[in-house]
Amino acid sequence: MSETEGPFQAEAGPGTGARTGTTPATAPETGAGARSAPETAVPWDELVTSALLGTDRRPLRAGPGLPDGPASLLRAAALHTVRRRAALRPAAGPPLPEPAPVDPRPPLPAAARRRLAQLLADRTAPAGGGRRGAAPDLTELIPQWLVTAGERGFRAPPELLPALLDAARARTDLRPHVLAFAGPRGLWLARSNPEWRFALRATTTGAGRAVTEGPEAVLRLWEEGLFAERVALLGAVRAQDPAAGRALLSGTWSAERAEDRLLFLDSLRSDLGEDDEPFLEAALADRSRNVRATAAELLSALPGSALARRMAVRAATCVNPDRTGDRAAIAVEAPHECDAAMQRDGVIPAPPSGRGERSWWLGQLVEAAPLGFWCERFGGRSAQEIVALPVADGWEGELHAAWCRAAVRQRNPEWARALLGVPSTPPANGPGTASLSERSQLLATLPSAERADWVAGFIAAHGLSEAFQLLGVCAVPWAGPLGRSVVDALDIARDAGSYPWSFSGVMGLAERCLDPAEADRLEVLTTARDEPEDASPGAGGYWSEAFRRLVSTLRLRAAMSAELTPARQRGEPDPDREDREGRESQEGREDRGSREERGV
């Protein structure tokens, strides 16, 4: 090949610009570029046609003595692509995002960072055969870890923010804890991924910032924000100034949608006070029935409200001391109609299916009347004495159920104690209600220590078969007597040959709620025991496995808590500080070396 027969003599492909003549006579033709050059002489259109039809149907004419197969086609296409791209000017890049905000909270200790990564990755192997195995379930410990880390004021590691946001996207129960732990950097990162948009809708950070910035920012967010942001803003404002929050809601109340008015009204429960009565009284005339009913319910939670007094007057015509017998009793005469005034005060006229009208109206009147009214009505008797009175004509169940709802609504612990009764009494024979759901609501009105003691007594007397809902309202970690009663009941169930899988829910709850300090005491329960003759097949192995998992989980929770405790509080040297100081020293030496090289 002569120098004037170089590779650029043929027609140039697209993107090669004005380079259509021959190459200079001095252009070298040695090397890899010269050996592949004849392949680049094939026009781009011919390459595309040969690639679409196949080299068998449209062979590539790369030049004499060169192969015509697919490999030659791919080499020619690669060379053409490089030439086409080399002739392009780079496009202007998008603007850089704003820097992430500063999170002033201290970083996690190194051990806690590793633990969080393990929890998010869930490295435990899945149990086979439908059984959970003896290894702790890490996914169930994530909420507790996040709560503890948040309480101790640590910030989330930047490298784990994507995994945290992904976990919160998949599990709604994690979202409040994740968003609080992720802090401002988590919100900054969430703006870059549409899948994390929930963080922007659910966060209360915008509401807190608006409250901090002042009334103008509050009003702007209230008028322009998303509904979730406005609900969060209303709560944040009322937490500082209930009157200001009420004024904010009153300003746009008539223009809100019915479903929004209902949710705004429901958000007033946490900071409800007597000053809210005029606003709620006006809401009794709302055009939405659900809004009227919610306003009436909130007013009945204020024993001194005018609605509560009106309900007490109506209830007094239905429930009275029975003076016909020799001993004190309660006489009941249910209302015969539901007039317009009752409906305005929130009484729903139509009963649910299977419920009588008169009993339905009676229950609504009694649950809305102030509980203190009954003590006056029955001659100064206490709540416990009133609940113990016999009720004529079979109205006891209806009357006690209404008092239970009133005690929950008015947060009255005295009436809650009376309606719960002694924990050793069977629910069907005790006062109040036999419904475990309503009993758990009554328990929630009591102090946490008293609540735990009552549930411990209930489990000791009746076992665990009916205690799951009651355990759910007890503070975590469970107090000593409550934890011991749960473990003792599980041990008794194992010795009795009970079907083990029916207690899996309670066992899972114990893993999350028992005091980790109980792990050593429970070690003796992990050994396998001989199965009774009437036991379920394989029950002994299951119980042993379940107790091993319980002990392992408690020890893991103890380790997690220790890892989240700063080293200075444990009286140990701080490895994170040593690492930090070492990095700072290394960076300082590198900076000095760089200055010396520049002659500074």
Image: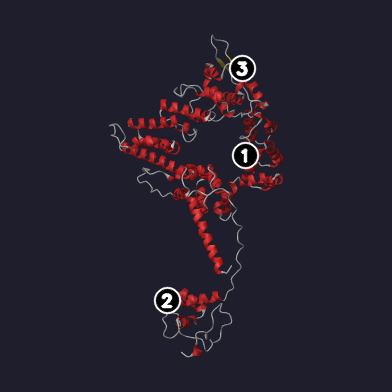
Q: Nearer the viewer, residue 592 or 139?
A: 592
The amino acid pointed to by label 3 is: Arg
Label 2 near label 1: C-beta < 8 Å?
no
The amino acid pointed to by label 2 is: Ala
The amino acid pointed to by label 1 is: Leu
User: To which residue does mark 1 refer?
Assistant: 263
In what element is the residue under mark 1? helix
State the mark number for residue 485.
none
Residue at (45, 39) in percent of width and height: 512
Is residue 263 in sight in this rendering?
Answer: yes
Q: Position of residue 315 (x, y in %)?
A: 62, 21
Residue at (53, 77) in percent of width and height: 83
**Mark 2 and mark 3: Cα distance apart in space:** 100 Å
Q: Position of residue 196 (x, y in %)?
A: 55, 52
N-terminal-most mark, 3 or 1: 1
Residue at (62, 62) in percent of width and height: 95
Vertical position of residue 242 compared to residue 405: above or below? below
User: To which residue does mark 3 refer?
Assistant: 377
User: To which residue does mark 2 refer?
Assistant: 71
Q: Quadrant of the C terminus?
A: bottom right
Outermost residue on the top side: it is 326
**Mark 1 and mark 2: Cα distance apart in space:** 68 Å
In what element is the residue under mark 2? helix
Q: Left or right: 485 with respect to 444?
A: left
N-terminal-most mark, 1 or 2: 2
Vertical position of residue 7 compared to residue 230: above or below? below
Q: Nearer the viewer, residue 538 or 391?
A: 538
Q: Position of residue 173 (x, y in %)?
A: 51, 43
Badge 2: few (under 14), some or many (20 or more) residues near its Cα, within 10 Å? few
